[in-house]
Image: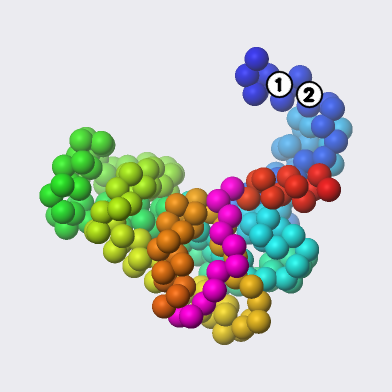
Amino acid sequence: MNKKTILVNNAENIKKIYFFAAGASSTERKEDLAKTLSSFFRYSKVVIENDLFGAAKAACYNKSGIVAMLGSGSNCAYFDGKDPLINNFGLGYILGDEGSANYLGKMLLKSFLNKKLPKELETKFIGAYNIDRSQIFERIYNKPQANIFLISFFDFIIQNKKHGYIIRMVDDGFEKHFQTCIIPMIEKYPDEDLHFVGTVAAEFEDRLVHTAEKYDIEIKSIIKEPILNLLKHYIN
């Protein structure tokens, strides 16, 4: 029995659903998602929040703090113990997302296309993806979900995380994330703990700590999978 079958068979027994989604910030978006879920989970109370709220709850529970996301995308906000305060950092994969998986994927592709990758990395990249310039342009500019395409290259970055070129690329991404998001938040809320949530933060914890130490900033926690903390919070 697969997970989908289990979910269908138990839909009427589920009483509460907490759903955290990227882009679920507006009232209209929340209402649309709640309506969709309620059509299937007819006896459930459905609560919709954005992914930053979920990250903040996972990191801080009901305490205040600065919460930064470094996963497929990136963002940062001050969490007052109830809600993340509105900020200007969540600009998406085209204008923002510094240090995220799609940002690093974009940097990797640019290096490949500009012939900047070291030969050994270029050989590995071609062997792993067998993709050329025209195919990359087609996938990014003419097909939907370009952000998903960019994120797909994060596996290659992880596999080669010890290579000096990759380390420098990650450090550069984290530097931009700190300059854009973290430093302004620390200056505004100097007494608050700083938490990071997401796969990129966890996979490159040593480089993240290295960047923080450059600014004499302490990272209170780094959480790879916020779902575990969210389960603990809402079950209790």
SS class of the residue under badge 2?
helix
Q: Is residue 71 visible?
A: no
Q: Residue furthest top?
A: 1
Q: Is residue 54 visible?
A: yes
State the image quarter where residue 87 is shown.
bottom right
Q: Residue at x 15, y 47 (%)?
A: 120
Q: Which class describes the residues within 10 Å of circle 1: few (<14), some (14-19), or many (20+)?
A: few
In the image, 191 versus 99, the foreground residue is 191
**Which residue has dot 2 on it?**
10
Task: Answer left or right for 84 relative to 145.
Answer: right
Part of the protein shown in magenta: 215-225
Residue 154 drawn at (x, y percent): 38, 47
**Which residue has dot 1 on it?**
6
Q: Residue at x 64, y 23 (%)?
A: 3
> Given contact means CB atoms under 8 Å apart, are the residues at marks 1 and 2 in contact?
yes
Residue 22 drawn at (x, y percent): 59, 52
